[in-house]
Image (cartoon, rainbow, N blue to C red):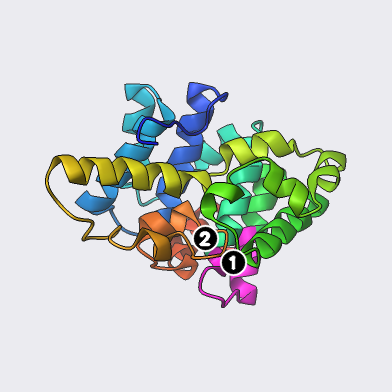
Amino acid sequence: MENAHVLEGYSDQEKGAYLGAVASIATADRQASEEELQYIAALCDAADISETQKEAVLRAANELTGEELTKCLDILKSSDLKYSLVTDIIAFAKADNNYAAEEQKRVEEISQYLGVNQNQFSLLNEFTDKAAVQNVAPEEKAKPSFLSSLGLNDKLKNAGINSGSLMKGLLAIGGPLVLGSILSGAMRRRGRTGTGMFGNLGGLMGGAGLGSIIGMLSGGRGFRNTGGLLGRIFGNRF
């Protein structure tokens, strides 16, 4: 799987904006570590984006004012990737089994900013909950048939969400698999074992749950750490 790609079918700008948003939220209120930058760069390579977009994504990982994240969100407003991003953020916020009211408000604010309506948001929230209790391998969750098994295909379609695009863009499922494969290959070539942030890929992928590429990149720091960054974007309404 080392040569697998993510976000296929989307434009270079859309992919860059999505990865930039992921990088910004994962490293909110601090500069990314060298290790995190390596993993973000690996995701960029897996998405096969241009050097210009890759530089923008890495810049977003170190930018503290929220300006880069705002640029990314503005691009994603007109992309189906906004649904994938909202899903990943929900999974990130729920990863510690302590989805507090303040966190819910933050997630909903991002969703509203992206133009995701309440019905769509509720369905994406339902998807993360149902996926979390399904004891199936991550490889199975990355398949389009997984949505059908949850009984959500028609609901998503009726709400204006393309289920095929959702699964194709959902790094919360596919990203850890691809990134883990890339990193494992790199470690083998260097004669190393998986020790650092990704030493336990299974745990970082959320076990039997949906997992979150944001949580994976942030080293489990938690959604609460994004408060200052999101406050700067949304006028401290949190």
Give the quarter of the image for residue 81. top right
Quadrant (top left/top right/bottom left/bottom right) for the N terminus = top left
Residue corresponding to mark 2? 231
Q: Point out the stretch of residues depicted in magenta.
A: 93-107
Residue 144, image quadrant: top right
CB of mark 2 within 8 Å of CB of mark 1? yes
The percent position of residue 162, horizontal first and vertical second, equals 74, 35
Q: How far across and down, in percent of the image, does residue 146 sit? A: 68, 48
Where in the figure is residue 192, as x and y percent of width and height? 14, 51
Check disc 2 and give the amino acid type. Gly
Secondary structure under the numbered disc 2 in the rendered image: helix
Q: Name the side, left or right, on which 22 lies relative to 168.
A: left
User: Quick one: SS at disc 1?
Assistant: loop
Instruction: Give the farthest residue toward the left.
Output: 191
- Name the residue that disc number 1 marks: 238
User: Which one is in front, 166 or 80?
Assistant: 166
Question: How far apart are the alpha carbons under marks 2 and 1?
Answer: 6 Å
